[in-house]
Amino acid sequence: MRFSLKEIAECLDCEVLYKDASFEENTLFEISTDTRKIKKGDVYLPLRGENFDGHNFIDKAVSGGALGYFTQDRHKINKDAKFIIYIKNSLVAYLELAKYIRNKINPYVIALTGSCGKTTTKEMLYSVFSTQFKTHKTELNHNNEIGLCQTMFNMPSDTEVCIIEMGMRSLGEIELLSNYSNPDMGIISNIGSAHLERLGTLKNIAIAKCEITKNLKKEGVFIGVDCPRLKENLNYDGNKIFTSYDDAKNIEISIDKTTFEYKGEKYELNQAGEYNVSNAILVIEAALYKGISKENIKKGLLNYKSIEKRWEKTTIKNLTFINDSYNANPESMNAVLKTFLSIYQRPIVLVLGDMGELGKDEIMYHKQIGEFLSNYSGIKLLTVGNLARHIARNTTVESIEFENNEECAKYINQTIKEPCVILLKASRFMKFEQIIEMVKNYDND
């Protein structure tokens, strides 16, 4: 979106430190926070964080063609710019401008959060809502305050529905996102153990997730999973809809497809997994509430495609890799394992890595995965990482422990010769995609 200096003054608490006499105030410009992408005529907004300070690149922005810039530091004066705007906090300014865009374009805003599955649910929502509305969404997993701003700044002026994914690592973060997006619909996909390390208890996680309703419009709607922890901590007097996996009937899951019935209608996904049914039900309720036809809901769900590292299939010679290492916590690990073990014939290989941010009970959660696997046979388990070794040491299935991805990839290449399906599951910081790339490179040697 393009702004004028007059608009900036209307929506921000700011001060013009300098303005060239030749500058015309009705000039329109775009705002950029990245000097690597700045274009001639843009205005630079330098963000400041714990480990970076965009103010160090003001001169680079101006020499790169920036028309003007914002600054938190009054002494940052470069009169090669046409104007300089002083602000107290650049991130707050960014958020205020994002809220200004939200209100000016005024789409129907859907805010979504959850301990796991929120990105998948967001993509399903987009696929369904796009069948009937001009829809915009959070890209990838850009679900923090900067991601919210990027979503609003990139929103086309004719957007009718905007889907905002909201992540959090501590209390107050989702409330902030809710404040600046002012949603019409709020969705919580689940309440799980992700971020226990930071929040301490499952109750605190529920409280943090329920902040999504802090600025949810009173005439709006909340949609969430039917679980006691959510209901006990939800503080919203508006319309509420609760869903449950148990409400789905005749569920059939195969390698590349899931079908189920919900409220008398049959739906199909080109994805495997019970967890995808739970996500889809939330999407169905959201779409029905917004008046999307059942035919378009079915079409949108069928057209949904998973994002990178979500059940991503790669074949290398006789090995089929299922990469689901976008992220992991105990709930998502159990759900993916349950699906994988139910649809693929033996022998199969599981490559499991560390699950992060689980707090003081992190070893216990990994042990429980091992105990869960003891109920199955025909499995070879490979673990990578200091925490994942507790999976291997607490299961009856055949298992081997590795220190790093390279060791694991080397073992797969040298040892697994028969046709086999291999599941990769771990938290994102484990970078399990490296295992696939290493096996590919071995194949090319």
Image: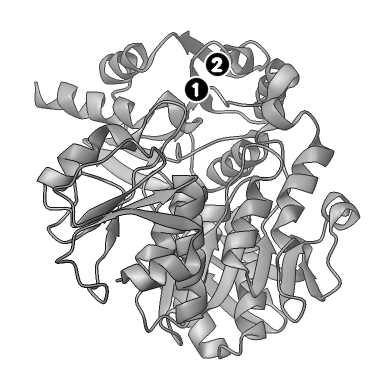
Residue 292 coordinates in the image, percent (x, y): 56, 88
- Res. 380 mark: 1
- Res. 47 mark: none
Write the residue at 32% across / 20% down.
412
Looking at the rendering, which quadrant does residue 430 occupy? top left
Residue 16 coordinates in the image, percent (x, y): 36, 56
Instruction: Give 3 or 300, whichever is nearer the viewer.
Output: 3
Q: Which quarter of the rendered picture does the C terminus lie within?
A: top left
Residue type, mark 1 in image:
Lys
Q: Which quarter of the rendered picture does the N terminus lie within?
A: bottom left
Q: Secondary structure at mark 2?
A: strand
Report whether 406 appears left or right of 225. left
The color scheme shown is: one colour
Q: CA distance from mark 1 to mark 2?
A: 5 Å
Residue 10 coordinates in the image, percent (x, y): 47, 70
Mark 2 lies on residue = 398
Q: Earlier in the sequence, mark 1 or mark 2?
A: 1
Residue type, mark 2 in image:
Glu
